[in-house]
């Protein structure tokens, strides 16, 4: 489950380097989670929800004030936790 630590790092790094972080972070997360998509439809849906929230986080970091960054990060972490829980059932 090392991929979850890497993805949490992507969530924490969102906005640190706006030039490269956006598309690369999404591609990296998609690649890391792709190995689990075939396990079940529920997990595939949870992964899609997480990726959407990660895209939202990146948009919020680029387009809004800093006070909105932590709630967006918390939402992405919650979705990632859901995937982790589904995989351990």
Image (spheres, rainbow, N blue to C red):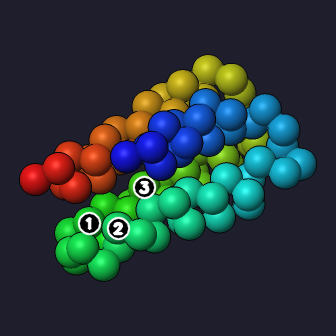
Say which of 39 and 49 sits in front. 39
Q: Which is in the foreground here, disc 1 or disc 2?
A: 2
Q: Earlier in the sequence, mark 1 or mark 2?
A: 2
For the point 47% across and 48% down, the residue is 3
Total marks shown come to 3
Q: To which residue does mark 1 refer?
A: 43
Is residue 69 toward the left or the right of residue 76 in the image?
right
Say which of 56 and 6 sits in front. 6
When the figure is inspected, residue 50 is found, relative to residue 65, above or below; the finding is: below
The circle drawn on residue 36 is: 2
Q: Which is in the foreground here, disc 3 or disc 2?
A: 2
Helix, strand or loop under label 2: loop
Residue 7: percent from the left, percent from the top?
A: 53, 45
Q: Quadrant of residue 12?
A: top right
For the point 68% across and 34% down, the residue is 13
Within-10-Å neighbours for mark 2: few <14, some 14–19, many 20+ = some
Q: Distance between the residues labelled 1 and 3?
A: 10 Å
Say which of 88 and 60 sits in front. 88
When the figure is inspected, residue 40 is found, relative to residue 29, above or below; the finding is: below
Q: Distance between the residues labelled 3 and 2?
A: 13 Å
């Amino acid at each position: 489950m090392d991929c979850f630590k890497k993805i949490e790092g992507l969530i924490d790094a969102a906005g640190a380097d706006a030039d490269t972080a956006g598309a690369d972070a999404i591609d990296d997360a998609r690649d890391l989670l792709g190995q689990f998509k075939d396990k079940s439809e529920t997990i595939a849906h949870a992964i899609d929800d997480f990726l959407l929230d990660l895209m939202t986080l990146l948009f919020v970091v680029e387009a809004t004030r800093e006070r909105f960054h932590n709630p967006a990060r918390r939402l992405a972490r919650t979705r990632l936790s859901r995937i982790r829980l589904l995989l351990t059932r």
